[in-house]
Structure formats: C-alpha cells, structure tokens
Amino acid sequence: AQSVTQLGSHVSVSEGALVLLRCNYSSSVPPYLFWYVQYPNQGLQLLLKYTTGATLVKGINGFEAEFKKSETSFHLTKPSAHMSDAAEYFCAVSQAGTALIFGKGTTLSVSS
Amino acid sequence: EPEVTQTPSHQVTQMGQEVILRCVPISNHLYFYWYRQILGQKVEFLVSFYNNEISEKSEIFDDQFSVERPDGSNFTLKIRSTKLEDSAMYFCASRPGRDRGNEQYFGPGTRLTVT
C-alpha cells in the first residue's frame, strides 16, 4: 500500500527566507509524486509533479522538488518566500493511473 | 483555460436526507474522481470513474454513495442518507487519460454541512 508522510503540520518562515516542506512516501512500485497547494476556501492547484525522467522538477510560482529514491523523499523548496505563498501544501503519491494518496498537509505561514 | 466546475459551492442538509453533488469535468477528459476533506484532515479518495463505470473505490465509498455520469458533461455524487460525519468538502477531479501519469485537475469543491 502507498502512503505519504509530511513532516511538520505547520511551517513558519520570514518573507525572503528559504521554504522547505518535507514529504516522504512509501510505495512498492515506482511512484508518481505531486505537490498541490490549497489557498483558503479554494480547491487544489497542482504545483508540480514527478513521473519519470529528471529528478529535479520545477513548478509554478518558483517552487521545485527533488525526487530522491534512496531516501523515498520528495521535498518541496522555494529559495525565497513571498507573502502570497501562505497556504496549505499537500504532497500526494499515486501509481500510474490510480487515485491520489495525500499526506496530511503542511500549513505554510509567511511573516513580514 | 478549461477548468472543473462544481455546484453548489455550499450545501446544507439535514441528517437522513439525500444530496447530489454536481461536477462538470474538463471536456475530453476520460477519468473522473471524487475526493473529500473533513475539516482539518487530509484529502481522502472516494471513487474513480472511467468508461461509465467505477474503476476504483475506497473503503469510505459504501452503499450510501453512488456516482453517475447522466449525460456527456455532468458527473454526480449522491449520498443516499446523509450522516453527521459526511460533513466535509467534496472535490471533483478529472484527468485526460492519454498519459496515465497525467495530473488530476481539481474543482473548487462543495462544502457539505449535515445538521
């Protein structure tokens, strides 16, 4: 069975600081990995995804994530946080064509 | 840009009543999904639908739930007799299907409140 663990339910950073949101997964087969963002009272928006190929994936709004098979990790980073990045972030895993399994989410707060 | 739409945005119902949540997936997408998110908890998969039948469902999706694609555009989730614990945000999603790794596109959700 697949599962996702997001370390840290709440991360706080200052504007301009590095953002690091952690995600570890468990999967018996090569996974497809995703990061979604949810702004208050809105739906889920895809930030980036890893399926095959390059392990460093770039997404929207300056975010990127690196797939590390040896560490079963897919951490999300952004070099410089912006106030507008404050939101809930979800890591998700799936196999080819199957349902997404989500982590519990990490709330990112950005202070000025 | 095409998007998934859901109606209503908020539904309030009494325990024991039937509710139907509606979704219009992105046209030419082939796979459709329902997920739910209980307040403060993670997003959970309910069911997937392809070629006019359920392709996968979770333990949550019991006999009280059903899905239907009544025409070429709508995709509905019916809860036959709502319970207090059905209160949640329900998200519809669709996926093109040409590439099995393609991401799922989510709608804005319907907030269901059961009183």
Image (cartoon, rainbow, N blue to C red):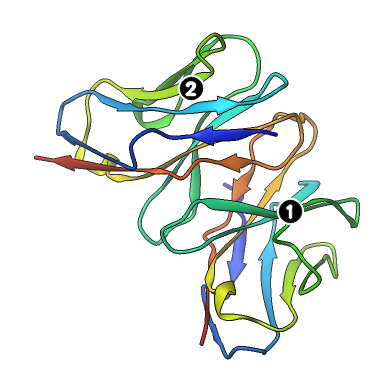
Question: Which residue is painted at 66% across and 23% down in the image?
Answer: A31
Question: Which residue is painted at 75% across and 52% down in the image?
Answer: B32
Q: Relative to B53, is B31 above or below? A: above
Q: Taking B108 as reference, is B28 left or right?
A: right
Report in which chain the residue with disc 1 lies.
B
Question: Which residue is painted at 76% across and 29% down in the image?
Answer: B99
What label sits on residue B58 in the rendered view?
A: 1
Q: Quadrant of residue A77?
A: top left
Question: Which residue is painted at 37% across and 52% down in the image?
Answer: A39
Marks 2, 1: nearer the viewer = 1
What label sits on residue A74 in the rendered view?
A: 2
- Going by the numbered disc 2, the residue's amino acid type is Phe
Contact, mark 2 vs mark 1 (Cβ under 8 Å): no
- Going by the numbered disc 1, the residue's amino acid type is Ser
- Residue A89 in the image, given as x and y percentages of width and height: 40, 41
- Residue A97 in the image, given as x and y percentages of width and height: 77, 35
Q: Taking A34 as reference, is A27 left or right?
A: right
For label 2, count other residues whose C-alpha is less than 10 Å away and answer few (under 14), some (14-19) or many (20+): many
What label sits on residue A22 in the rendered view?
A: none
How many marks are shown on the rendered structure? 2
Report in which chain the residue with disc 2 lies.
A
- Residue A46 in the image, given as x and y percentages of width and height: 51, 38
Identify the secondary structure beneath mark 2.
strand
